[in-house]
Amino acid sequence: MTVGIYVPKDASQAVGRLDATLVKVVAAEAVEKTLRAAIQAGTLTASDEATLLRDAVERGVIGKKDADTIREATAARGEAIQVDDFPPDYWRHEAEPSANLRAAVN
């Protein structure tokens, strides 16, 4: 996606963050494939990520380093897709009418 363009190494910059995330997600693909196969084989039960990774490490399906790879990819993916964050009631506030508008109405 970024071939031929400048990619900052600083993950605080958007393109740098996307590129770093891509590297982590690609690194996690093989581990995810192993987890899916273990679920299909009945060795693991599909559940939330934390439980699945804990069970997979305990049962020797993957190692702790592999679990960390998945966690890092998940965290990076979450950071990469974040957009502007507004408080829950942001859109409920009505703008205060300007003094000029109030004078024109009165």
Image: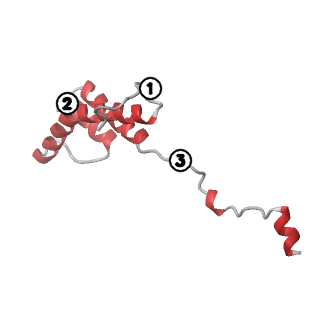
Under tag 2, what secondary structure? loop
Horizontally, residue 61 falls left or right of residue 74, namely left
In the picture as drawn, the residue positioned furthest to the front comes out as 4
In front of the other: 7 or 64: 7
Looking at the rendered image, the quarter that the C terminus falls into is: bottom right
Mark 2, residue position: 62
Of the two numbered discs 2 and 3 on the same chain, state the one appearing first in sequence: 2
Query: How crowded is the residue under tag 1: few (<14 C-alpha within 10 Å), some, or many (20+)?
Result: few
Of the two numbered discs 3 and 1 on the same chain, state the one appearing first in sequence: 1
Horizontally, residue 85 falls left or right of residue 51, namely right
- Say which of marks 2 and 3 sits in front: 3
In space, the residues marked 3 and 1 are separated at their CA atoms by 20 Å
Under tag 3, what secondary structure? loop
Find out whether the residues at labels 2 and 1 contact each other: C-beta distance under 8 Å.
no
Q: Amino acid at mark 1?
A: Asp
Q: Amino acid at mark 2?
A: Ile
Residue 89 in percent (x, y) is at 63, 58
Find out whether the residues at labels 3 and 1 contact each other: C-beta distance under 8 Å.
no
Find out whether the residues at labels 2 and 3 contact each other: C-beta distance under 8 Å.
no
Which dot marks residue 84? Answer: 3
Mark 1, residue position: 10
Q: Amino acid at mark 3?
A: Asp
Of the two numbered discs 2 and 1 on the same chain, state the one appearing first in sequence: 1
